[in-house]
Image (cartoon, rainbow, N blue to C red):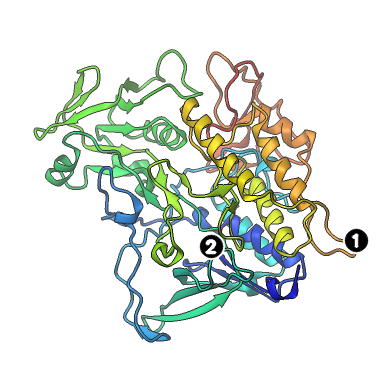
């Protein structure tokens, strides 16, 4: 890499799993003069930090998008400056509920150089502790700047120039003095590792906004769910049928007034021909009426519901991205995808901007490939260059057309079609090997043991398709003994499955 275009300083936004592996990959190059990780929470851990008391009045607006719900903060003039603490909702608290366990086998989820404490599926405190320990394990915890929110990211040199540079506007909350400290800092490159499980999404439904105003607190999002005890003897309707809906419906059956209603657009991979005992399936909600009645697409209805819990996911939010200064938005909400992206990691028009953690795939382990590819590329030690702009644009356009035709999300990557291995393989080829003298990480191989775990171990079985053979799914190095407890459950509750159906094995993520 030419000296005038050399990347010397790198800012990493976020200290969750994506930020941890990115920092480790860049530090391993022993090339960059300065690496700084900015984390708005009080510790590392990202979405795995457990907040026992979620916000009671989280702003929920049906159909609203993150730019409206999570706008940028006004930046004070004449920085540095000390101001009173911010009072605007920033969606910093996580969606972790008390009974949550992972749903990717530990051997496939953990980073390649440090296993989880046990597995295959672990309670939420294990990934949180793991991420914190990972910073210490690689001696990069000194690179962390905690309680520090990146409020603005602005390009301060023209796009496609020989030397891009970025200005970050930062706000650090000082809990001792109860003030916010603002300042600016410049970096040669920026990695977005800020996650995308912060701003909840609730779809627009006829009458829902008025219903929420008339019955305050009755409608909530799964982000604020923590325990079934708050719903004891309550009449509950869950909206959605993905992983969180499955977890919450299982959790709530022990306390709610039966039946528990579950509104679903389509069957999930773990649904059988009939609902589990205590649950009644309903189609999509058609209308909320002011007398409290909830009407479904088949014209059936439910009266007297005490709580409606939306398990309808999240939309990525980038309130720090200065679209006016940078010339464009970074996220296309109409098509629900990154704008001008290549391999879900790189950008067509910003050579010193990368993102780690966007695709829904193997979580921690797939982040590792992205982080290493970026580190190798920005140190000038890559084995394979990125293709030209025309090829990158072609990749994005072709994928967008294909995914729309298939009715699937742009950033969802499937396992059984071979797409996951293909995508990780491309990142693997870009990164190549580290140096003979030890600098740089090498992307891990997707070995037989890992592939077997992905294809044979699951948190929930598929009724009618999977043969439950408890205890037969042990992977060497992972404990499945009765001594391992998962939030009060025996670790043997996971299942070994016989494959048969042609479905995406990663659809539960």
Whether residues under marks 2 and 1 lie with C-beta atoms below 8 angstroms apart, the answer is no
Residue at point 44%, 38% (across, down): 244
Q: Position of residue 500 (x, y in %)?
A: 64, 15
Between 45 and 143, the one nearer to me in the picture: 143
Label 2 vs label 1, nearer the camera: 1
Tell me the number on the disc at residue 436: 1
Residue at point 38%, 48% (across, down): 223
Dividing the picture into quadrants, the one containing residue 435 is bottom right
Quadrant including the N terminus: bottom right
Q: From this viewpoint, is residue 292 visible?
A: yes
Q: CA distance from mark 2 to mark 1?
A: 31 Å
Q: Position of residue 286 (x, y in %)?
A: 22, 27
Left or right, 199 with respect to 268, comes to left
Mark 1: secondary structure:
loop
Q: Residues within 10 Å of mark 1 (few under 14, many from 20)?
A: few
The residue labelled by disc 2 is 14
| Relative vertical location of residue 138 with respect to residue 345 in this rendering, above or below | below
Residue at point 66%, 58% (across, down): 21
Left or right, 461 with respect to 247, comes to right
Dividing the picture into quadrants, the one containing residue 283 is top left
Q: Position of residue 326 (x, y in %)?
A: 46, 64
Tell me the number on the disc at residue 413: none
Dividing the picture into quadrants, the one containing residue 294 is top left
For marks 2 and 1, the one nearer the N-term is 2
Between 12 and 257, the one nearer to me in the picture: 12
Residue at point 47%, 66% (across, down): 41
């Amino acid at each position: 890499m030419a000296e005038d275009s050399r990347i010397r300083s790198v800012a990493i936004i976020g200290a969750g799993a994506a930020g941890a592996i990115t920092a480790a990959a860049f530090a391993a190059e022993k090339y960059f003069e300065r690496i700084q990780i900015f984390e708005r929470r009080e510790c590392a851990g990202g979405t795995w930090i457990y907040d026992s008391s979620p916000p009671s009045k989280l702003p929920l607006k049906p159909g609203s998008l993150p730019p409206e719900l999570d706008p940028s903060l006004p930046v004070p003039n004449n920085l540095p400056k000390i101001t009173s603490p911010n009072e605007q909702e920033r969606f910093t608290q996580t969606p972790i509920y008390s009974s949550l366990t992972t749903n990717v086998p530990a051997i496939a989820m953990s980073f390649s150089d440090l296993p989880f404490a046990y597995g295959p599926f672990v309670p939420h405190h294990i990934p949180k502790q793991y991420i914190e320990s990972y910073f210490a394990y690689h001696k990069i915890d000194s690179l962390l700047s905690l309680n520090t929110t990146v409020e603005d990211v602005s390009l301060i040199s023209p796009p496609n120039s020989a030397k891009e540079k970025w200005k970050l506007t930062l706000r650090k909350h000082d809990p001792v003095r109860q003030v916010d400290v603002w300042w600016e800092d410049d970096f040669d490159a920026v990695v977005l590792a800020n996650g995308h499980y912060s701003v909840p999404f609730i779809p627009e439904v006829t009458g829902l906004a008025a219903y929420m105003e008339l019955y305050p607190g009755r409608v909530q999002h799964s982000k604020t769910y923590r325990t079934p005890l708050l719903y004891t003897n309550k009449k509950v309707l869950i909206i959605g049928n993905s992983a969180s809906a499955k977890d919450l419906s299982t959790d709530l059956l022990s306390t709610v007034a039966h039946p528990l209603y579950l509104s679903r657009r389509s069957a999930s991979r773990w649904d059988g021909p009939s609902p589990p005992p205590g649950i009644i399936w309903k189609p999509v909600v058609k209308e909320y009426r002011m007398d409290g009645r909830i009407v479904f697409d088949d014209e059936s209805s439910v009266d007297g519901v005490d709580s409606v819990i939306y398990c309808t996911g999240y939309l990525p939010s980038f309130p720090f991205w200065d679209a006016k200064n940078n010339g464009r938005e970074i996220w296309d909400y109409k098509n629900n995808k990154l704008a001008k992206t290549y391999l879900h990691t790189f950008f067509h028009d910003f050579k010193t901007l990368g993102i780690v953690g966007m695709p829904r795939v193997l979580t921690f382990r797939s982040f590792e490939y992205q982080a290493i590819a970026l580190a190798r590329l920005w140190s000038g030690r890559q084995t394979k260059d990125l293709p030209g702009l025309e090829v990158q644009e072609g990749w994005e356009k072709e994928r967008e057309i294909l995914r729309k035709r298939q009715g699937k999300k742009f950033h969802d990557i499937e396992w059984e079609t071979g797409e996951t291995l293909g995508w990780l393989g491309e990142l693997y080829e870009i990164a190549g090997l580290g140096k003979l003298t030890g600098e740089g990480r090498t992307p891990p191989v997707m070995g037989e043991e890992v592939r077997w775990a992905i294809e044979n171990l699951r948190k929930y079985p598929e009724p009618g398709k999977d043969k439950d053979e408890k205890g037969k799914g042990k992977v060497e190095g992972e404990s499945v003994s009765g001594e391992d407890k998962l939030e009060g459950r025996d670790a043997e509750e996971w299942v070994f499955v016989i494959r048969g159906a042609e479905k995406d094995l990663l659809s539960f993520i």
